[in-house]
């Protein structure tokens, strides 16, 4: 037996003006789950606590709650000392019980046609991963788009994709999905990461539905324009200034001893919209002994096309990019755009290792920068945090230069083609970021993705800086401090 | 308790598991249908937790006659043969309904529904969707339900059936706030599932509290064979709080082997022909015996091992098992599971005809709450088939019943109100009573039974029934009512066990020696109702 101290969200709309958190000290057995803590509270301390549960074994999806902010199934998540248990971010009926019915009703039902052909073994195998959903609504709770725009939600999209794969269904699910908000998903992947059944909704449902929508000519005109641009120029944005690639030689030698060599995949945004940031990154790498090889024939990674379901030209992009690095015998390719990194890691079959710049810098034990008298908050890029699982590395780097204040990791709205396709949604999500940034009281915002940096900067008055720019500022400060001594 | 909400329909279905939803779908063809669920429809009950599969004769090499014989033999010939005939004959068509409505079962290379071997069957006839077959069925049924006109009332617990003289004409429920809902209907279908939550160790979901047995009994219906409780051979043994969680028979169907702590494949001593795929009663007793005689693991189980199977087979055919054990730090591809018997299914229940009619006019029953289909031991895979075959039949019979003018008897409603008001001044928390009951049942009415222990258990239950349950808030009225249902259900199980003075199938009386096997038993069903109780002794033809 062990004693746990927990905080539980309490709210009875009939008697309470405001929700509050109640503290409980409960005794449970080794291996107890969150649900058993709730049982202990209900049976031993306070029978008025309301919570929903049923099967107790992760199969019915009744008991999802948030533990320390993250949606989990109460019956499978291990109970921990000090945890805070709250309802999903859905309308609360009482305590931990939320109104699930409208969201469950939004999930489509199969409508059999006149003639029914059973799915083949291959079709069953494709449908199955989408079918293990237990409709716990953890994904709905986590979806940032749902908070700012009309959208059927992740699990409804999952079912639309499952139905579109099933020969027994008679409806046009793709067109329905478009009407229900298919293009409002920012591909932030929050839904996938909280799914207790690990259903990859963005990749296996949303992007697949968007590809089917593309075949029906339902791709948004602004997404089509991007696709045309990629086909015509190899780039997803147009040239408005001197690009990064035009400013650098093919090989950048480090200032001192060579500690390692990486190929650099620059990506459209750093190449053409934020070249200065990429140049800052090069300075940091050179200062730390990393030789950088920059093949000039590299082009768009294809991420904007994959996310919007326009995959016709993807193979060409993949082949040309892989060839550009393989041709030079490069065994490690570094990305600094979170989107490109996630795409190369997850959507390419690369014959070389792909590392994000945060991983590269930590691997090579970088020179310590000077501390800056700056309070900063960090925005986790979705394609870095969830797409590549990179959470601790940027924090470790930043905390060497600035005082870091955390804020919740939520999508800024720039991904998934939403910034171009549904700009009012992208703006609403960025506005939510602005509020979170303000709450932290930070002087600057740091991130590690050109889309996030560019988009958030449009919505906040605080400077938004790339992590390598901040590191470089730390080095410059260090040099400045050192300089007077040299003169002495 | 505030203003009462009265809703009327042609058919009222109580329960939202496989049988209830199937009944509602069918009934809605004939008239206005209302489905009341104490959980969110589709999430409660045990169908959604059913893992292994659905038995149906689908191949030329198999036959309904063999399925019939397997089921009767597995049930120690206590089954009602007429009901078994219906089960085996109609199970194939009912699975085809599910397939038409979108169920995603595993299929063979030639696009036929795949089937796996299950215990006590001479042909591999268990259709499956990995090891989440029941969930797949439930998703399909809820989908189908959405396309009907059935009205669904979620999270209302029925606490009493209502009657108009001798006929059931509705039910009374309470919601999360303790408010009353009154339902009136021409026919009422009980599809409330089982009740093995009356045991300390059980596979059932929180809804397996025996509500329907209690509601039916109190409304005057006759129940049969309530002593026949199936202990599933393989339930999880740790951590403590998840003990009893089902480890599907599909694990053995896929080739899993049972070993005791000495590494011996002990089934060779109990059923050398069928080994791990013997019937559940035999395997459960074998495991219990190994543990009782000191050959169990230190966690109080035996080993169930699939490490010799190809990893991909475990990953694709048993994904839920793999995931559940991984949560507790056991990778079943690398190390054996530890398992022990767990209370799983009540074979007994309301006596029904082939059309789901109970002994009370206006009241129908289907699924686990009904008795007679599975006799003294249910074959794995027959319960899911039962939900569909008898769910459809009960729904159809209820739907074709005569339209009537139904009026609520306010005397009955007042009586319930009084019963509930007593809870507001009670003094024992229902959870305390439930825990005492579960312990007493596990100790005194478990796998191995004798008259002395059964009498003692009955005494404990009797005492628990005298305690004054306390509802601390209106929300706890439901808890009090459910504790009451559990006490009634447990009483029926223990009294049935005392009435049956023989060992038969899952029911083992160690204090009785007998000169007959199930097929030659002089006894038929035990029966219990408000007006009579006993055991049938007619010589079988």
Image (cartoon, helix red, strand yellow):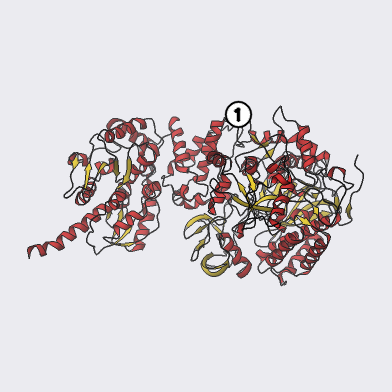
Q: Point out residue A179 in the picture as x, y percentages from the top left corner.
A: 48, 39
Q: Nearer the viewer, residue A152 or A320?
A: A320
Indicate the quadrant where residue B310 lies.
top right
Q: Is residue A113 above or below residue B356?
A: above
Task: Please name the residue shown 30% across and 60% down the image.
Answer: A399
Look at the image and tell me whether residue A136 can be seen: no
Label 1 sits on a secondary structure element that is loop
**Which residue is the site of mark 1?**
B111
Residue A437: x %, y % from top left: 34, 59
The percent position of residue B218, horizontal first and vertical second, equals 81, 57
10 Å crowding of disc 1: few (<14), some (14-19), many (20+): some
Residue lying farthest to the left in this orientation: A488
* Left or right: A116, with B401 as reference point: left
Q: Quadrant of the C terminus of chain B?
A: top right
Q: In the drawing, does residue A444 fall left or right of residue A213?
A: left
Q: Say above or below: A341 vs A34.
A: above
Q: Residue A486, relative to residue A305: is it above or below?
A: below
Q: In which chain is the residue bearing label 1?
A: B
Q: Quadrant of residue B314?
A: top right
Residue A307 can be seen, yes or no: yes
């Amino acid at each position: 037996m062990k004693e746990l101290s927990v905080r539980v969200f309490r709210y009875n709309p009939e008697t309470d003006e405001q929700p509050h958190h109640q503290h409980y000290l409960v005794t449970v057995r080794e291996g107890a789950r969150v649900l058993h803590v709730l049982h202990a509270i209900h049976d031993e301390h306070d029978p008025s606590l309301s919570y929903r549960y049923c099967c107790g074994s992760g199969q019915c999806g009744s008991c999802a709650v948030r533990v320390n902010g993250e949606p989990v199934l109460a019956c499978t998540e291990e109970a921990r000392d000090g945890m805070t248990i709250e309802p999903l971010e859905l309308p609360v009926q009482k305590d931990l019980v939320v109104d699930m019915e409208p969201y469950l009703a939004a999930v489509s039902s199969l409508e059999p046609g006149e003639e029914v052909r059973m799915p083949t073994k291959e079709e069953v195998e494709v449908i199955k991963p989408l079918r293990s959903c237990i409709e716990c609504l953890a994904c709905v709770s986590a979806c940032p788009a749902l908070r700012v725009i009309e959208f059927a939600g992740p699990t409804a999209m999952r079912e639309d994709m499952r139905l579109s794969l099933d020969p027994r269904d008679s409806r046009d699910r793709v067109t329905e999905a478009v009407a229900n908000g298919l293009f409002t998903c920012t591909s932030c992947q929050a839904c996938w990461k909280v799914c207790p059944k690990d259903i990859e909704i963005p990749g296996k449902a949303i992007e697949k539905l968007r590809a089917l929508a593309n075949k029906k000519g339902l791709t948004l005109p602004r997404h089509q324009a991007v696709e045309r641009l990629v086909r015509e120029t190899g780039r997803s944005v147009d040239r408005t200034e001197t690009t990064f690639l035009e400013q650098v030689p093919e090989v950048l030698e480090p200032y001192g001893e060579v500690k390692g060599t990486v190929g650099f995949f620059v990506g459209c945004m750093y190449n053409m919209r934020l070249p200065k940031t990429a140049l800052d990154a090069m300075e940091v790498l050179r200062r730390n002994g990393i030789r950088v090889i920059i093949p000039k024939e590299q082009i768009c990674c294809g991420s904007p096309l994959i996310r919007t379901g326009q995959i016709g030209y993807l193979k060409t992009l993949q082949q040309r990019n892989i060839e550009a690095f393989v041709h030079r015998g490069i065994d490690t390719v570094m990305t600094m755009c979170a989107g490109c990194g996630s795409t190369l890691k997850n959507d390419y079959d690369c014959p070389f290792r792909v590392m994000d710049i945060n991983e590269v810098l930590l691997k090579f034990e970088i020179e310590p920068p000077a501390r800056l008298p700056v309070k900063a908050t960090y925005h986790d890029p979705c394609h870095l945090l969830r797409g590549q699982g990179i959470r601790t590395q940027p924090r470790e780097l930043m905390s060497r230069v600035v005082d870091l204040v955390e804020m919740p990791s939520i999508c800024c709205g720039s991904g998934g083609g939403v910034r171009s396709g549904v700009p009012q949604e992208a703006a609403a999500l960025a506005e939510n970021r602005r509020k979170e940034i303000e709450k932290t009281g930070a002087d600057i915002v740091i991130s590690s993705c050109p889309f996030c940096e560019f988009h958030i900067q449009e919505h906040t008055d605080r400077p938004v800086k790339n992590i390598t720019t901040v590191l470089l500022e730390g080095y410059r400060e260090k040099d400045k401090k050192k300089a007077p001594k040299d003169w002495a | 308790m505030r203003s009462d909400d009265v809703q009327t329909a042609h058919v009222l279905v109580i329960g939202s598991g496989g049988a209830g939803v199937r009944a509602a779908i069918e009934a809605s063809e004939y008239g206005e249908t209302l489905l009341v669920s104490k959980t969110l429809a589709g999430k409660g009950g045990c169908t959604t937790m059913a893992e292994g599969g659905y038995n149906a004769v689908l191949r030329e090499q198999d036959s309904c006659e063999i399925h019939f014989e397997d089921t009767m033999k597995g049930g120690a010939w206590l089954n009602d043969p007429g009901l078994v005939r219906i089960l085996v004959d109609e199970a194939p068509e009912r699975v085809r309904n599910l397939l038409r409505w979108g169920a995603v079962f595993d299929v063979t290379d030639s696009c036929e529904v795949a089937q796996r071997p299950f215990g006590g069957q001479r042909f591999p006839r268990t259709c499956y969707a990995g090891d989440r077959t029941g969930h797949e069925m439930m998703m399909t049924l809820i989908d189908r339900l959405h396309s009907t006109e059935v009205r669904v009332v979620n999270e209302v617990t029925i606490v009493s059936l209502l009657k108009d003289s001798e006929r059931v004409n509705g039910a009374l429920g309470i919601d999360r706030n303790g408010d009353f809902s009154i339902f009136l209907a021409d026919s009422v279908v009980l599809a409330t599932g089982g009740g093995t939550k009356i045991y300390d160790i059980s596979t059932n979901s929180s809804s397996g509290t025996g509500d329907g047995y209690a509601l039916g009994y109190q409304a005057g219906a006759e129940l049969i064979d309530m002593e026949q409780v199936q202990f599933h051979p393989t339930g999880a043994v740790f951590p403590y709080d998840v003990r009893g969680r089902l480890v599907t028979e599909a694990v053995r169907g896929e080739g899993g082997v049972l070993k005791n702590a000495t590494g011996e494949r002990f089934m060779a001593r109990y059923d050398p022909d069928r080994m791990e795929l013997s019937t559940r009663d035999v395997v459960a007793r074998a495991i219990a015996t190994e543990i009782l005689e000191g050959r169990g693991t230190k966690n109080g189980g035996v080993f169930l091992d699939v490490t010799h199977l190809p990893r991909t087979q475990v990953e694709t055919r048993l994904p839920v098992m793999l995931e559940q054990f991984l949560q507790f730090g056991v990778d079943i591809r690398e190390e054996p599971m530890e398992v022990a018997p767990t209370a799983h299914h009540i074979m007994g229940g309301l006596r029904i005809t082939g059309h789901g009619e109970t002994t009370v006019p206006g009241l129908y029953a289907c699924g686990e709450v009904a008795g007679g289909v599975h006799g003294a031991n249910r074959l794995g895979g027959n319960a899911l088939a039962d939900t569909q075959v008898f769910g459809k039949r009960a729904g159809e019979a209820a739907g074709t019943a005569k339209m009537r003018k139904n009026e609520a008897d306010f005397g009955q409603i007042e009586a319930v109100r009084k019963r509930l008001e007593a809870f507001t001044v009670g003094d024992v928390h229902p959870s305390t009573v439930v825990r005492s009951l579960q312990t007493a049942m596990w100790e005194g009415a478990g796998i191995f039974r004798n008259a002395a222990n059964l009498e003692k258990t009955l005494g404990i239950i009797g005492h628990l029934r005298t305690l004054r349950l306390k509802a601390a808030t209106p929300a706890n009225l439901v808890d009090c009512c459910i504790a009451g249902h559990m006490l009634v259900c447990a009483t029926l199980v223990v009294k049935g066990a005392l009435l049956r003075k023989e060992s038969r199938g899952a029911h083992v009386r160690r204090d009785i020696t007998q000169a007959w096997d199930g097929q030659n038993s002089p006894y038929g069903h035990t029966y219990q109702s408000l007006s009579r109780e006993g055991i049938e002794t007619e010589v079988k033809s």
